[in-house]
Image (spheres, helix red, strand yellow):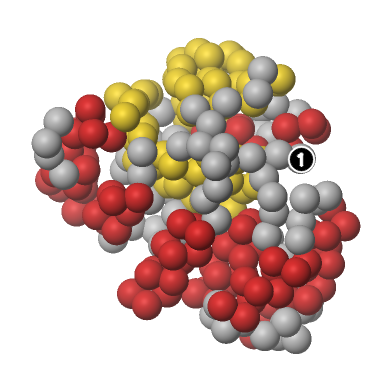
Amino acid sequence: MLELKNVTKKYLRRTALEDVSLTLEPGKTCLLLGPNGSGKTTMMKLIAGLSRPTAGEITFDGDPIGKASKAHIAYMPTENYFYSYMTIRDIGKYYADFFADFSAQVFTRQLAAMELDPADRIRQLSSGMAAKLRLALTLSRDAKLMMFDEPLNGVDILTRTQTIDAILAGRQAGRSMLISTHLVDELEDVVDTTIFLRKGKLVMAGDKREICAGRTLKDLYIEVYGHASAESSESAGEVR
């Protein structure tokens, strides 16, 4: 179980997250929602242990986020983090050395399904292909919590469907999924819970059916953030 207790993250004069408390139960698929600048990427990086909160505490299965939790949490960021000269095969070997739960066999199957050539170098990949590689790497781990930061960002319609199918196939009993996105209508039918952030503050969180109360998640998103905000968000790029 993932718990955030009064978590605040500040960067100099800017507050990215402010006094956020929430719980993500095991086995749940959760959408992390909010316009640009809401703090979604910041929250994920804190959970992944890539950054530390200014105040508050984050625990996973009762233990503080740290070296032990990194062995059980997989994170797909929006940005590329590979050296351009490396091949896809090189990246797979790197992950296998770094993560004990990484499966080379699963990675091979993921690459085949996503039509990625292991011999291709990173500099040869389009933005969509690089996104599929990040997805394949994340899904090749046997992590208890998988986080995907804007997995549908910058990919075409066919790749969106492929990405959603791959994420759904990666769900297992007891595994939690945390997904940030602006394309709420694409993932509405596959999520159990939702988290709404705005300007670093928690707006609401909980069971999707209870929160929506008969509305679609997209309608609720527009109601919470306003028509102009929703329209600009759906066409926006990376969220910080």
Horizontal side of 215 relative to 57 (left or right) equals left
Q: Amino acid at mark 1?
A: Ala
Q: Residue at x 35, y 50 (%)?
A: 190
Figure check: 157 above or below 100: below
Figure check: 81 above or below 219: below
Q: Residue at x 33, y 74 (%)?
A: 157
Name the residue beneath numbered marker 1. Answer: 71
Q: Position of residue 62 (x, y in %)?
A: 67, 18
Figure check: 193 above or below 167: above
Horizontal side of 1 relative to 108 (left or right) equals left
Figure check: 56 above or below 95: above
Horizontal side of 86 relative to 126 (left or right) equals right
Taking depth in this image into account, of 173 and 82 the one nearest to the observer is 173
Q: Residue at x 53, y 14 (%)?
A: 5
Please say whether residue 42 is visible from this viewpoint: no
Residue 72, by quadrant, is top right
Q: Position of residue 29 (x, y in %)?
A: 44, 42
Taking depth in this image into account, of 178 and 207 the one nearest to the observer is 207
Q: Residue at x 52, y 50 (%)?
A: 171
Question: Badge 1: how crowded within 10 Å, few (<14), some, or many (20+)?
Answer: some
Q: Residue at the front extreme?
A: 173
Q: Position of residue 23 (x, y in %)?
A: 48, 22
Taking depth in this image into account, of 74 and 228 the one nearest to the observer is 74
